[in-house]
Amino acid sequence: MLLKDRVVLISNATKFTGRAATAAALGEGATVLVTDESFADADRRKAWEKEFKGSTALAEQAPAEIGAAVKARGRIDALVNNDAWPATRAPLGEAKLDEFRAAFETMVVRPFALTQHIAPLMRQRAYGRILFVSSAAPLRGIPNYSMYVSARAAANGLVSSLAKELGKDQITVNALGSNYVENPDYFPPTLLANKEAMARMTAQVPLGRLGKPQEIAATICFLVSEGAGFITGHVLPHAGGWA
């Protein structure tokens, strides 16, 4: 098992790759802690823990509170920053600055803040894996999506600097540049059911299909495993050859 006896924290568990990553990490033997805005509700936490037996849904919401809750549990080996924001078409002349700021808050500021509170716990043990589940979009650029792409680019940009800063403590920092991967935020059921739209999309992917949730989850598990200890500072495309 890749993650036997490891403690993994996955943020925004009900979004993006959260469900698949949780299931995969549990399957690889990890103790999994998860956060989500919906987990402020006790019933939602219970429902999650019933569905993903062996995981612990944290009620805490603010990064500092999450950090304190993780510290109280003794240790942390890996942090998966699983952040999502709608990739809404917004040409330059129509883009709204409040939405631009919100995109940066969600995909850059908040995961940075969570990393601030988790990294010191890893430093104490001179071991850690930090992974930003991001996007391959900044590697190519997409017209009319500059707000989304630039926020993802900022998150990707954190990786090279944090990798150099934390490397001496044997903490790796990477980003997964995903695109064209099935997930509820970017490929809802209504879109998946639209054959014409899906044909246009998959035509952009050299592999000719969307990525499966289980595929990106397996990649996440590897990148936060002990075996990935010499991989750091990279944005690794996971986009079927698109980037």
Image (cartoon, rainbow, N blue to C red):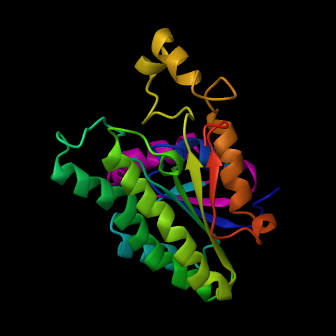
Point out the stretch of residues depicted in magenta: 25-54
Q: Where residue 27 appears, x then y in whole percent?
A: 73, 48
Q: Where residue 234 appears, x then y in whole percent?
A: 63, 64
Q: Residue at position x 30%, y 53% from top?
A: 103
In the picture, measured across the screen, residue 93 lies left or right of residue 164, that is left
* Residue 59 seen from this side: no
In the picture, measured across the screen, residue 5 lies left or right of residue 131, that is right
Residue sitting nearer the eye, 198 or 185: 198
Q: Where residue 23 appears, x then y in whole percent?
A: 64, 45
In the figure, 36 relative to 191: above or below? below
Residue sitting nearer the eye, 131 or 47: 131
Q: Residue at position x 56%, y 84% from top?
A: 165
* Residue 214 seen from this side: yes
Q: Where residue 242 appears, x then y in whole percent?
A: 61, 37
Query: How many numbered discs, if any?
Result: 0
In the picture, measured across the screen, residue 227 lies left or right of residue 152, that is right
Q: Is residue 241 magenta?
A: no
In the figure, 128 relative to 4: above or below? below
Residue sitting nearer the eye, 64 or 142: 142
**The quadrant where residue 215 appears:** top right
